[in-house]
Image: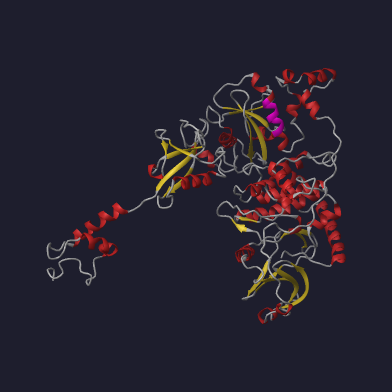
Amino acid sequence: MEEANGGVSPSVAPQKPVAHVRPMLAASTPSPTTSPSPSPKQHVLQVQRPALVHTVRAKKCRFVRNGDRFFRGVHLAVNLERFRNFDSLLAEVTRLLQGTECMPLPSGVRTLYSTKNGIRVTSAEDLKDGEIYACASAGELYKKTQYGQVMRKPRHLSPHLSKVPEHSPCSSDTGTSVRPRLIVIVRSGNRPRRVVRVLINKRNSPSFEVALNHMTEYVKLDTGAVRKLFTLEGKQVQNLEDLMACQSGVFIAYGTERHSRDDFELDLEEYKSLQSLTKSTGRRVFPPALMTMSVKPIRKFCGSAEQLSRKSKGSCSPLLRTSLMKKPPPPKPKMPRKTKTTAKKPPVASPPPSEEPDSLPETVAREYEAGRIIGDGNFAVVKECVLRKTGEYFALKIIDKDKCKGKEHMIASEVAILRRVRHPNIVHLYAEFDFPRQLYLVMELVKGGDLFDAIAAANKFNERDAATMTRHLCSALSYLHQRRIVHRDIKPENLLVDVDESGCRILKLGDFGLAQEITEPLYMVCGTPTYVAPEILAETGYGLKVDIWAAGVILYILLCGFPPFVSASNDQEELFDVILSGIFEFPSPYWDPISDSARELVASMLQPDQSLRFSAEDVLDHPWLSECYSSDDEASLQLYHRLGVRFELSQETRSDTHLSS
């Protein structure tokens, strides 16, 4: 039998190792008439060798920022079949670096250097598996340093402390309440010294040692890790309690180097940097420490201001005095009109009236009885309905599938998200009925109207009322964000007022038409102009914190009656430019009675830098909410009553119920 089957005959079932490479063996195996049959063991050897040689394996490389030894880099598996030219590889690395903590490259990644020898890489074939490559802009020379090294901890910090829980016994800050806040840090070194902002909260700073390690990633001292922290008055910060007690929120960071008295005197450039950064944190113009400190070069550059300071008896600097001069109050901006979302929707021809269903399908009608129309939108109509068994009222949202062709994925995403969420501050989905041409959603009926009507009626709210509504909204956002769901259309029109069993009014978040679960940065430009975040307009990739930006705009409106970003000529492009700049004011006299704590929270929610912007949990942890709000507080009940009166009056005149459609 062996002589008859001298080779691997196609009619005979081959052995398992040979099964996957029969064409290769057919080309390389000698004829049965000229050579004897190989043994099964020889077959295995002949199969495995070519398979290993012809396997194309991706090269796993790490890409860091040229000259930045603190950035740990991004990982990418480089497959030559995927990146057939070098430009496509550079474009992919540029995309991966966007949104990370590395210093931005103005024109993207244009050059790669091997960190092993500093040689420039010119093609994807030159990359080697497991190596690190420095990304640079066009014309940028290679900077030799220790790339991608894990941050070296201070000697007094144990390696395991970065994962210590909040109330760990080995932390000297046990019991210290860490409230979320933005602090400003002056980096020790050559003048003018760099000034940076850092977000501190209970998650990234469970102890003072971990807080210093967190600051190190942003301050980036030449001497390594941040080991010492001083206030502008020269007092060393020893623990979290000292850190939280500093009212100015401005510190000077040191590594192993010694400090001197001159370090606490700022030059003009540093002073200007502090002026802009402390203003962006929401504090009134300057921290108290800056109001009395001296600025060395001011006399040299501001002679006329020096003469002014001689005539006055105050101790604050001339630059401060000129900036604090009273100006005529600007005209009060107006609230925007009620708007639809800016997501582009294709024009659809309305079907003839005969095609509109006058009655419910038998499956739906068996359980529910439809009533009057209470809402109408581009894709859907909303009717009031009654559950036949109990007599309970619901809202029946009828989505016409013919009208939303091309948007089916958005409808599916909205329904999938509504199925998942269960929260007292989110509109509830009870049942759904899917038919070939219509989708029926049985939802919670909310008769109170929306927050936009309340703002229009009240103009503005006191701090207690604003804090209560902010807590309701951010409680819903915290629930969504923990599940990696972004709403993307937070605005007063989508915040509805409901009455609970005890007769209290609560805010509920509705309209999940643009909501999406996040698995990677999003780039779709959508939302409502007044409330859209700058990273959406910049199209650089965004995530969950676009909802916090919109919530910050709403909080600003609740406290003063108008939005922070407006266009004087009512031009949308001009409005977008103002939002992209991220610059807004707390104009007098409208903001004079508002507390510093409220200003600080608004500014922390409206930070253009996503890494510095508060999360929903940070907002809920902020002391302003805890000071202003209590679940059984009489003021909160008064707010519910006032909201109910407003919305009930609105219901009598308009007789409508808002439900997103």
As drawn, 387 above or below 557: below
Of 583 and 391, which appears nearest the observer?
583
Task: Identify the residue at image location x=57%, y=51%.
Answer: 521
Left or right for 457, reference 121: right
Residue 523, given in percent of the width and then of the height, sits at: 60, 52
Residue 646, given in percent of the width and then of the height, sits at: 85, 59
Q: Main SS type for the magenta part? A: helix
Of 480 and 211, which appears nearest the observer?
480
Displayed quadrant of residue 441: bottom right
* Quadrant into which the N terminus falls: bottom left
Q: Is residue 128 visible?
A: no
* Quadrant into which the C terminus falls: bottom right
Displayed quadrant of residue 454: bottom right
As drawn, 369 above or below 337: below
Number of numbered markers: 0
Is 242 magenta? The answer is no
Task: Identify the residue at image location x=58%, y=24%.
Answer: 189
Q: Is residue 63 visible?
A: yes
Residue 563, given in percent of the width and then of the height, sits at: 78, 47
Residue 97, given in percent of the width and then of the height, sits at: 53, 43
Task: Identify the residue at image location x=67%, y=38%.
Answer: 182
User: Which span is picked out in magenta?
Assistant: 269-276
